[in-house]
Image (tube, rainbow, N blue to C red):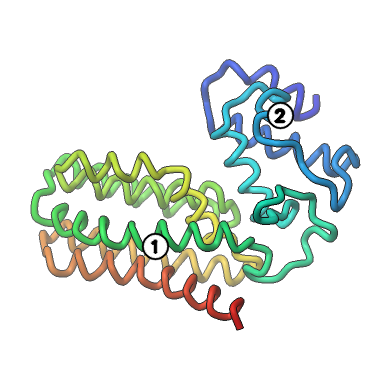
Amino acid sequence: MDAETLLKNASSSGKRRSLTELVIQALNDKIDRGDYPPGSKMPTEPELCSEFGVSRTVIREAVASLKLGRRLIARHGVGVFVAEAPGHSEGTAFIDSTTLNNSMHVLELRTGVETECAAYAAQRRSEAHLRALKEVYARMEIVAVDDDAECARADFEFHLAVATCSENPHFASILRSMGQEIIIDLRLKHAKANPKERRTYIRRIQREHGDILAAIEQQDVTAARRAMRRHLNESLERYHNLTSSRAE
């Protein structure tokens, strides 16, 4: 049974993650079969929504995943195209400038919001919310490092749990409202081309999350603020460096 048939059977399940994965496989199948030849322009979002019977959010996540997989390329103001030579790009060279700039802007906003969010989490967290944060952290440690989608989702859940610890519902609301953009940003960061580099990166990110968790558990407001800012600033600097190198 191919991915398109599976998609039809699962379309009423309401599980967005499952639908996204099925759309990704269906689109990959179409590219492999030559339905979408190298260099061809992809159908529009509304056309893909109609074809697969899913929401725009599912299509956007699927297309974003295929961009990260170097199968699709976005050309600003023109559309999304099938890559001429998929899989040959190194590092982050395959990321289009629009996606890169948007991810950088998302990180700038997150740095301002989540730095103070972590501080309030350290100050106000309840034992129940702290236990929930620890459970999310523990789940992150068992996610397969080669699954950038799951790593990104686990990462997002950790930050959402920190927001919940702040006891201010607006922090969590802001993160949820930006969920799609944050997930795309996290997948850009987690999608390392080299498996060894990916494992090293994931371990470092988990240590940074551990520093945030420890500061919140110890109710050290200053340390929590500093740990979150350090965690987000590293990624922001990386995006700034990428933007500068492309401008040269």
Name the residue rendered at 80%, 58% in the picture.
Answer: 86
Q: Secondary structure at mark 2?
A: helix
Mark closest to the chain's N terminus, 1 or 2: 2
Q: Nearer the viewer, mark 1 or mark 2?
A: 2
Image-based side of 235 in relation to 212, left or right: right
Name the residue rendered at 63%, 48% in the picture.
Answer: 65
Question: Percent from the top left, x then y, of residue 90?
Answer: 70, 71
Q: How far apart, in angstroms, are the residues tagged by discs 1 and 2?
A: 39 Å
Total marks in image: 2
Q: Secondary structure at mark 1?
A: helix
Q: Quadrant of residue 92?
A: bottom right
Question: Percent from the top left, x then y, of residue 218?
Answer: 12, 61
The residue under label 2 is which amino acid type?
A: Glu
Name the residue tied to disc 2: 47
Nearer-the-camera pick, 133 or 107: 107
In this view, 205 is above or below 38:
below
Query: Which residue lies most toward the front here?
Result: 77
Question: Percent from the top left, x then y, of residue 37?
Answer: 88, 46
Q: Quadrant of residue 176?
A: top left
Name the residue rendered at 45%, 66% in the picture.
Answer: 203
| Residue 206: numbered disc | 1
The residue under label 1 is which amino acid type?
A: Gln
Badge 2: how crowded within 10 Å, few (<14), some, or many (20+)? Answer: few
